[in-house]
Image (cartoon, rainbow, N blue to C red):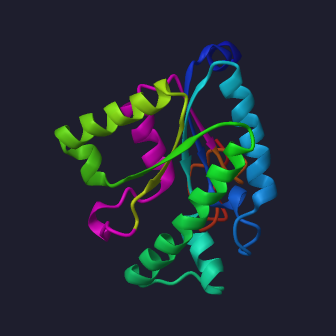
Amino acid sequence: MRSKVTGAQRWVVKIGSALLTADGKGLGRAAMSVWVEQMVALHEAGVELVLVSSGAVAAGMSRLGWTARPSAMHELQAAAAIGQMGLVQAWESSFAEHGRHTAQILLTHDDLSDRKRYLNARSTLRALVELKVIPVINENDTVVTDEIRFGDNDTLAALVANLVEADLLVILTDRDGMFDADPRNNPDAQLI
């Protein structure tokens, strides 16, 4: 397994909200900086990186002073729109400290299910990677509906890995590993 990881040239890295936010107090810039340092080291070693980042809703909630996640779709979308600004600014400034450029890519399910839009997204991502720019991808939460959402950024990351023909998909989370059920909702969930 280690040889597959060390030999992988194109990586999709997905970082979950829990690793990017400071216990609901907004973006954890210090934690983000540590992730960026590691990604820059990979980039310097010749690894092509595509970043799928969570955190927009959490960042937006913090900016709005909300302590509880809203259930109404329009409020979640508003929080995502507000938080996306800070999230992208944080990634851009952190990567810029290391002389790296980033690009924001917002995707919807429609973008990856329509052949023409899929090919356009793939071409854009390939061009960015060739330019040594690190794409920062998130779901375009402000325009999607319940019926066409990816559901979570893990699913989006898997689809992006396929889109860019990645050699490796790394999902970073605060969970111990893969469970047979959601451990947040099921106390009997077993680590696989």
Examine the image and state in which quarter residue 121 appears: top left
Look at the image and say whether residue 152 sits in the magenta stretch: yes
**Where residue 48 sits in the image (x, y, percent)?**
56, 25
Q: Where is residue 88 in the image (x, y as percent from the top left)?
A: 57, 57
Seen in the picture, residue 178 relative to 166 is either above or below; the reply is: below
Comparing 82 with 174, the one in front is 82
Say if the magenta span includes residue 42: no
Q: Which of 92/10 is in front?
A: 92
**86 on left or right of 139:** right
Q: What stretch is highlighted in magenta?
A: 142-171
Q: In which quarter of the image is the C terminus?
A: top right
Tell me: residue 11, above or below residue 121: above
Vertical comparison of 30 with 178: above or below? below
Quadrant containing the N terminus in the rendered view: top right
The structure residue drawn at horizontal position 25% and vertical position 34%, both measured from the top left corner, is 119
Residue 29 position in % (x across, y down): 76, 59
Res 181 → quadrant:
bottom right
Image spot of residue 124 (x, y percent): 36, 35
Point 30% across, 69% down: residue: 145
User: Residue at (42%, 75%) from the top-left corner?
Assistant: 77
Residue positioned 69% across, 36% down in the render: 99
142 horizontally vs 110: left or right? right
Q: How many labels does the image show?
A: 0
In front: 121, or 15? 121
Res. 162 image quadrant = top left
Above or below — where is 142 with respect to 63? Answer: above
